Image (tube, rainbow, N blue to C red):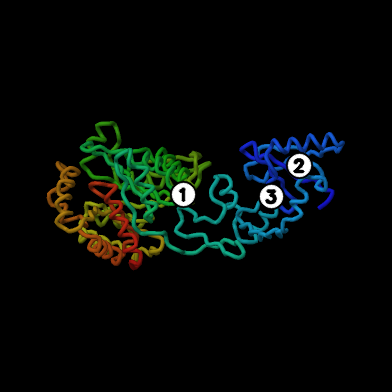
Amino acid sequence: MPGRPAIACVDKDNRTLHAWSRSGGAVRLRSRSRWRGETERTRAEGLRPVQAEARCDGRGVRRVVEDRRPGDHPAAALRAQLPRVPARRVPRRPVPVGRRRGHRGRVLERLAGVPDDARDGRRRRGLPQDGRPRVGDHRVRQRDRLTGMVSMSSTPPPSRLSVGAPNAPDMLVPFARRAEELGFGGIWTQDTLSAANFSLDGLHVLSYLAAVTERLRLGIGVLYSGRRNPAVQARELATIDQLSGGRLTVGIGVGLAYHRENLAALGIRTDRPVQRLIEGIGVMRALWSQSQAASYDGEIYSFSGIGVQPAPVQRPGPPIWIGARAEPALRRAVRIADGWTGAAPVATDDFLQQLAFVQREMDEQGRDPAGFTISKSVYVAVERDEEEARRRLIPAFERAFGGNPVYDAASMTDRVAVFGPPDRCAEQLAKLFDAGADELILYPLYDPAEQLEAFGELVPALAGASRP
């Protein structure tokens, strides 16, 4: 258009000069040295050059040089001969409700049914506001592709299989990231008191993994009640829940009796372990739900007006699963916990009997199965054939449980492990799902990285396993 200044810029190579018309087309004019000659000739003829607009379209332009009116421009004739390309109109993408800012965005969020506390909590904690799945919730946010509106569905997590984390520090990050890529639902650590083998503190490992994962649930199985003060433990667990954006699951139990002698020698109270478990859970829940001025009245712990920060992301707190085997402990888990987790050293037949008892207790106590999770840890070895897997498992169990006063390491391979080709392992794990298990946590006993890849074959194989 006559009368409007053109735009002339020097490219990154500091030599080639381009001119942009108002329609966005680019014309390569000539080398920089020749352009200088044209500019000097213009000045000699008494024509006043016009400074070009200081704009850049991101094509590697470095600086702007002088230009003249398009009618007097040396390349005006050349530009006039070029075909005019109409500008392409790009449709504006609708902004999802959760990302609209200001008063108008808040109004739209209210109309979409997003509660004020949820919106404020997302912004305060820096959580996703664009419809990504809310971690720590088995529901998934779904976005309408036309309107951008976000709704909640009861879609289950990507997988009901989780995996146990290795104890090697240099393997933690690649192992967790690969588990997430393979589609596992969570990663778990342990709270062991044994000094027979090298092990990392389970809670610190979860804090570490929270920073390098985005979707995996983070679980610990199981914390020994009474080993930590419940108020301190509540703060530690809430911190991990904050760091992970609400992905924590807490396993807790009374622990095995042979550990208590060592704990007592260290000055840790070990009397009344069951009461300490019950009240410890009550203290944590009170502090999580009443962070400013909590109160609790028990036989061992009693306080009022005490607050602990931070509050967990999951409200009223992270789910608590009790590890138990005996019938009184199983009955207690149904009564006070959010779930029950079976130990890996428990044989499948024993677990199925315990599961049947738990299901009867849920009926008698009126517990909704949808609000009570049943899980089990399983030692798994995937190899080409059963004999190869057995050959590798026997020494692995001896290293892990040799000298243990409770478990017989020599018989554990055939008694508690699932091993063999992928199809055989998937078949045995499917039986646990069919019986009523909601989640299985697979623990490798050797070659964690290689076994993780083999476990990955089980994820799609068990994707259609029946739910209770």
Callout in the foreground (3, 2): 3
The amino acid marked with disc number 1 is: Gly
Depth check: 337 or 49 in front?
Answer: 49
**Circle 2 residues within 10 Å: few <14, some 14–19, many ≥20:** some
Side (left or right) of 166 relative to 312: left
Residue 468 visible to an observer of this rendering: no
Side (left or right) of 433 relative to 181: left
Q: Give how far across and how far down residue 383 sits, in percent.
A: 21, 55
Callout in the foreground (1, 3): 3
Label 1, on which residue?
246
Label 3, on which residue?
26
Label 2, on which residue?
53
Q: Give how far across and how far down residue 8 sits, in percent.
A: 73, 42
For marks 3 and 2, give the CA distance: 15 Å
Callout in the foreground (2, 1): 2
The amino acid marked with disc number 3 is: Ala
The amino acid marked with disc number 2 is: Glu
